[in-house]
Amino acid sequence: TQLLEQSPQFLSIQEGENLTVYCNSSSVFSSLQWYRQEPGEGPVLLVTVVTGGEVKKLKRLTFQFGDARKDSSLHITAAQPGDTGLYLCAGLVTMDSSYKLIFGSGTRLLVRP
Amino acid sequence: NAGVTQTPKFQVLKTGQSMTLQCAQDMNHNSMYWYRQDPGMGLRLIYYSASEGTTDKGEVPNGYNVSRLNKREFSLRLESAAPSQTSVYFCASSELSGMGYSPLHFGNGTRLTVT
């Protein structure tokens, strides 16, 4: 059974601070996705990383896929209250002839003004 | 463009009652999924349908059944609801890309309470 562990589970920081969220597994994934979920809504895709060692930037968010494709990190620079939400990582596995995502348990981020 | 639409948004059931959660997508996606989200446990896959006419069990299928009615619609049925099925249920759809991966597009969820 594939398992994705996210840390920390909760994070409360002041506006302007930096933070890093980690996503770790003992399994190798063909790709890894990061989603953000706001209250009352479904998760929305932020980014997909595919290649080991890949780094992608989305404004103040930097995503990295580990060289062995077992782990990933999300770094937010100068966090804003609008970054508040639940961040979920999800690893892609192939099952039979289809693909499915294994989700981590999430990191709940609160950015205080 | 509505994306993925789930109904109802909220539901309260008594133990033993049955109900069907509806999901429809207008993006012409081949694959559809049902997840449940519980505090501290992330999203867990209940059932999925890789393409029209096929359905398969996910991680937590017990107590649920699904129907892929057509390419657009994928329903989830609880035949005899139990308190352990209190959760937020999300439907999602995806289309395989040429790279072999595809993001999920989620609905806004159905919040189900079983008393």
Image: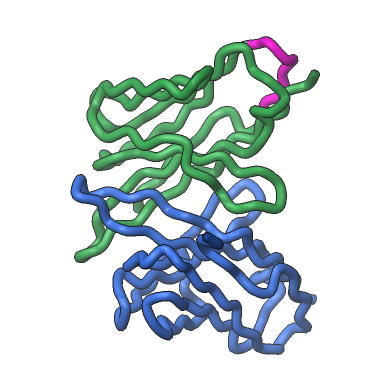
Res. A83 image quadrant: top right
User: Where B2 falls versus B18 (above or below)?
Assistant: above
Q: Residue at x 71, y 53 (%)?
A: A40
Residue B40, position as x, y percentages in the image: 62, 46
Location of the C terminus of chain A (image quadrant): top right
Where A32 falls versus B49 (above or below)? Answer: above
The residue depicted at 70 percent of the width and 65 percent of the height is B111
Q: Which chain is green?
A: A
- Residue at point 72% right, 24% down? A81
What scheme was used to colour the molecule? by chain
Total labels drawn: 0
Residue at the spot x=54%, y=73% of the render? B23
| Residue A3 picture quarter | top left
Residue B97: x and y, percent? 25, 51
Q: Position of residue A32 (x, y in %)?
A: 35, 39
- Say whether residue B11 is visible: yes
On screen, residue A108 above or below A54? below
Describe residue A40's horizontal placement relative to residue B27 as left or right: right
Chain identifier matching the blue colour in the rendered picture: B
- Relative to A15, say whether B50 is above or below: below
Residue nearest the observer in this picture, A9 or A38: A38
B11 on left or right of A31: right
Range of residues picked out in magenta: A11-17
